[in-house]
Amino acid sequence: MGVSISFISATMEELDRAENDPSWAGEYIYELYDSDDLSMPDRPHGGPDKAWAGLQFLLDETDVEIEFLMDGFQILEDGTLFGWSAEQIGSLARQLRATPWERLAVHYDPEQMMTEEVYPNTWRFDPEGELDWLERSYEELVTFFIEAAESGYGAFMSFSF
């Protein structure tokens, strides 16, 4: 299964309720992701899934201010669910929209990523394939943030391991 991060858009009311009632939030998120079809398919949702650490490695070399494991506010004490405000989503959407993939790709260094044990630490096995995977994951992430921001959503970020 592995360590992964996923986002699903959330209204500010849902985020407020989640902050005040974390047990509700855990159940609510579980229901949203429990079936093959999201119960609210019109809501933006997306990765970066298992590519989060590789993308973080690349994003750290740009001026995009995102820290997957530190941003947002913690909802569940076990560190598996976070809330991101609509303002955070909007700010990141603007930054990501202004950051084409090519600005990240130039920082791709499979050897350094292996040395630093960047999860999932598979960079040397198929360096070009992994770069393509990171690009697809980045595009999905950008799409999520832009669509969520355009609709005025915040987000739930699920961190599973």
Image (cartoon, rainbow, N blue to C red):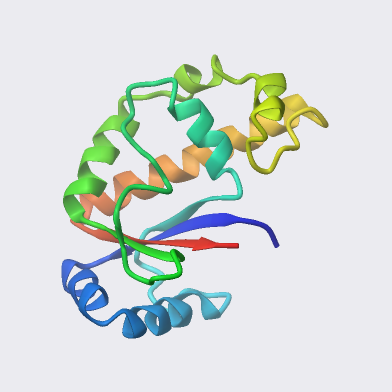
Question: Considering depth in this image, is 82 or 132 the residue closer to the camera?
Answer: 82
Count of residue discs: 0
Q: Give the image location of residue 144, x and y in percent.
A: 38, 49
Q: Is residue 98 above or below residue 94?
A: above
Q: Give the image location of residue 50, x and y in percent.
A: 61, 49
Q: Is residue 25 above or below residue 89?
A: below
* Residue at the (40%, 40%) spot, across then down: 142
Q: Is residue 40 above or below residue 73?
A: below
In the image as oriented, which residue stretches furthest toward the top? 106
In the image: residue 134, left or right of residue 90: right
Q: Which image quarter: residue 156?
A: bottom left
Q: Give the image location of residue 150, x and y in percent.
A: 22, 49
In the image: residue 10, left or right of residue 57: left
In the image: residue 2, left or right of residue 107: right
| Quarter of the N terminus within the rendering | bottom right
Q: Give the image location of residue 102, x and y in percent.
A: 49, 18
Q: Is residue 27 above or below residue 67?
A: below
* Residue at the (48%, 58%) spot, across then down: 6
